[in-house]
């Protein structure tokens, strides 16, 4: 697998970088990924060189920071062009060796960057951590990193799968390392690049790239400001006052102030411990997953079902499916009242299929909160993700909310995407009117689809039950009439999990049980005998009156149902 190849190569490069530590400075580490593929165009290739040179010159203007630079190229060849160093003129010289053209295996480049991240080291400024960061200069159009080819990049190779591979790697690296993206080329995918830099980084426009080199300087100012000022928030005026007292003689440009405000907003990212930075997120990403296509989708609204026995855990209200359990036939549900638990939805208990919750069309009604799990949303004013939601006008259901202003939505096309809802003051989605025709139709469609899938799953379950029955010698294949007098499936399901079997001759007098208020005492042998299965798996013939009634209804209409009373319990056969 190519992923392992690039990880192994990253380990080799990490060792080489350590061996060259003598040429490194004492400041933070920066890994540049330069996309030299065909898709950026010749003008984009020239633009990359100019941008990179400008950034390196700015680093050289701040020797007190003593920052290290590593360079990875991604194009015809994907490799380390230069290991960590603070020899800036030498680093600029590596641009002469760049080659234009080829595919754009950005995933491989990010995997390769692990070698530089491992050999780099973090710095502490007050409570803030300055960790190695990645600066990507690209058009944001990755190709499949598994393809080794001399082909030139084209839209044919720019697949959704290639983007998904890159997102998975970036998601892991971005937990601890800020990622900055600089869009270049004739047609950059800015929305995708912005998605890559959501965590601790951001999009940097080509005209402001010198700010990349002032990142450590501005982070230090933010750290001191946060440590010395007892503030819930900061403004440009706050920064001006602080700069005059703590950095006399230093001029903070408007761009510097914007950087400080941005870093302060994301201070939780810079102050967290990397060892436990996103344990909760990793657990949630694993647990809140769709594992079984026959279970209700994430985001489906549910209420207590026919087999509910959990007292008032639901507070007698509806809830939302937030994931599929690792245990087959179980759902993770968050109730509108706030509680969470797992419940059976088709899981068997003592040979009975249990439905402790069932789907419903009740919308989520908000009380003293701006958004909640179960809300139906659509595109908001700051939407920048193209048609990842399925297209304009598509609806989705919120299934997870984070305190930093990020919400997780399952869209009607099946995509699970996290969006800003207050993060950095942006709103990618907004809440729909819960009683609008669109929301009612959306919820009803979810219910209809789920019920259809449930019926399909039930039929498969019956088929497995019949196979298991045949293997035990009860009602072998020779005793089943598939075309005459038999049902399409000779194994019939009761709502409470009992099963019936037709077309078997019985000589067992154990069928003398109470039924319809009377007791049958004679041995009964029928050519079309219906049977029922108890909770212990034992098959027992119906008494004569009940059997005759079932056959009469069946002969009249094979698709009809009949309700019978057995042991003082109503049961429906169909």
Image (tube, helix red, strand yellow):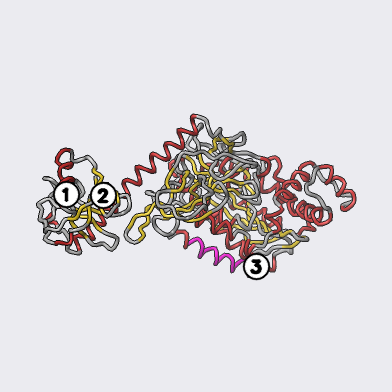
Q: At which x and y percent is residue 143?
A: 48, 47
Q: Disc 3 or 2, which lies upstream in sequence? A: 3
Q: Nearer the viewer, mark 3 or mark 2?
A: 2
Q: Is residue 148 visible?
A: no
Q: At which x and y percent is residue 230?
A: 82, 53
Q: At which x and y percent is residue 368?
A: 65, 41
Please identify the quadrant where the C terminus is shown. Answer: top left
Q: Is residue 532 visible?
A: yes
Relative to the observer, which residue lies in front, 552 or 519?
519
Q: Is residue 236 left or right of residue 422?
A: right
Residue sitting farthest toward the top: 437
Q: Is residue 17 magenta?
A: yes
Q: Residues within 10 Å of mark 3 (few under 14, many from 20)?
A: few
Q: Is residue 380 magenta?
A: no
Q: Which range of residues does the magenta coloring cover? A: 5-20
Secondary structure at badge 2 equals: strand
Q: Residues within 10 Å of mark 2 (few under 14, many from 20)?
A: some
Q: At which x and y percent is residue 22?
A: 69, 68
Q: Disc 1 or 2, which lies upstream in sequence? A: 1
Q: Which mark is residue 545?
A: 1
Q: Report which residue position mark 3 lands on.
A: 20
Residue at 44 percent across and 51 percent down: it is 290
Q: Residues within 10 Å of mark 1 (few under 14, many from 20)?
A: some
Q: Are marks 3 and 1 in contact (CB under 8 Å)?
A: no
Measured in 3D between alpha carbons, the distance from the residue under mark 1 to the one under mark 2, in whole angstroms, is 11 Å
Q: Report which residue position mark 2 lands on.
A: 565
Measured in 3D between alpha carbons, the distance from the residue under mark 3 to the one under mark 1, in whole angstroms, is 92 Å
């Amino acid at each position: 697998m190519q992923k392992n190849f690039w990880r192994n190569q990253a380990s080799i490069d990490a060792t080489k970088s350590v061996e060259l530590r003598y040429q490194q400075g004492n400041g933070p580490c920066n890994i540049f990924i330069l996309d030299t593929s065909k898709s950026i165009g010749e003008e984009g290739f020239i633009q990359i060189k100019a941008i990179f040179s400008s950034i390196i010159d700015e680093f050289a203007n701040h020797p007190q920071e003593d920052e290290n630079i590593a360079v990875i190229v991604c194009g015809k060849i994907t490799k380390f062009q230069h290991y960590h160093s603070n020899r800036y003129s030498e680093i600029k010289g590596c641009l002469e060796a760049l080659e234009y053209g080829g595919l754009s295996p950005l995933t491989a480049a990010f995997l390769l960057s692990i070698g530089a991240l491992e050999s780099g080291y973090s710095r502490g400024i007050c409570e803030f951590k300055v960790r190695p960061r990645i600066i990507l200069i690209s058009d944001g159009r990755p190709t499949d990193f598994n393809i080794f080819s001399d082909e030139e990049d084209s839209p044919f190779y720019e697949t959704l799968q290639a983007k998904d591979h890159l997102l998975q790697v970036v998601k892991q690296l971005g937990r601890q390392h800020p990622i900055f993206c600089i869009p270049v080329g004739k047609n950059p995918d800015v929305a995708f690049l912005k998605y890559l830099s959501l965590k601790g980084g951001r999009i940097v426009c080509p005209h402001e790239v010198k700010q990349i080199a002032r990142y450590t300087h501005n982070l230090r100012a933010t750290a001191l400001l946060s440590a010395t000022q007892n503030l819930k928030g900061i403004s440009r005026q706050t920064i001006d006052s602080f700069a005059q007292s703590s950095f006399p003689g230093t001029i903070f440009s408007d761009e510097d102030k914007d950087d400080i405000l941005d870093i302060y907003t994301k201070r939780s990212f810079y102050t967290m411990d990397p060892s436990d930075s996103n344990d909760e997120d990793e657990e949630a990403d694993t647990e809140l997953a769709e594992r079984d296509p026959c279970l209700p989708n994430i985001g489906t609204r549910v209420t207590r079902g026919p087999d509910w026995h959990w007292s008032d855990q639901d507070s007698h209200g509806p809830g939302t499916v937030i994931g599929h359990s690792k245990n087959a036939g179980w759902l993770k549900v968050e109730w509108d009242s706030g509680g969470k638990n797992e419940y059976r939805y088709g899981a068997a208990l003592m040979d009975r299929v249990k439905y402790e919750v069932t789907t419903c069309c009740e919308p989520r009604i908000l009380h003293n909160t701006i958004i909640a799990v179960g809300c139906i949303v659509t595109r908001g004013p700051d939407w920048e993700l193209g048609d990842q939601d399925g297209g304009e006008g598509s609806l989705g259901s919120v299934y997870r909310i984070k305190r930093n202003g990020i919400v997780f939505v399952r869209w009607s096309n099946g995509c699970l995407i996290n969006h800003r809802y207050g993060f950095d003051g942006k709103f990618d989605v907004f809440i729909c009117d819960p009683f609008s025709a669109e929301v009612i139709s959306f919820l009803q469609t979810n219910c209809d689809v789920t019920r259809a899938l449930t019926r399909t799953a039930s039929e498969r379950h019956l088929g497995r039950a019949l196979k298991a029955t045949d293997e035990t010698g009860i009602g072998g294949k020779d005793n089943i009439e598939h075309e005459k007098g038999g049902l399409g499936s000779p194994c019939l399901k009761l709502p409470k999990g009992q099963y019936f079997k037709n077309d078997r001759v019985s000589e067992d007098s154990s069928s003398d049980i109470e039924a319809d208020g009377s007791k049958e005492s004679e041995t009964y042998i029928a050519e079309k005998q219906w049977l029922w299965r108890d909770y212990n798996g034992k098959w027992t013939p119906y008494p004569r009156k009940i059997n005759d009634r079932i056959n009469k209804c069946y002969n009249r209409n094979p698709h009809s149902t009949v309700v019978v009373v057995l042991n003082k319990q109503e049961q429906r056969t169909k």
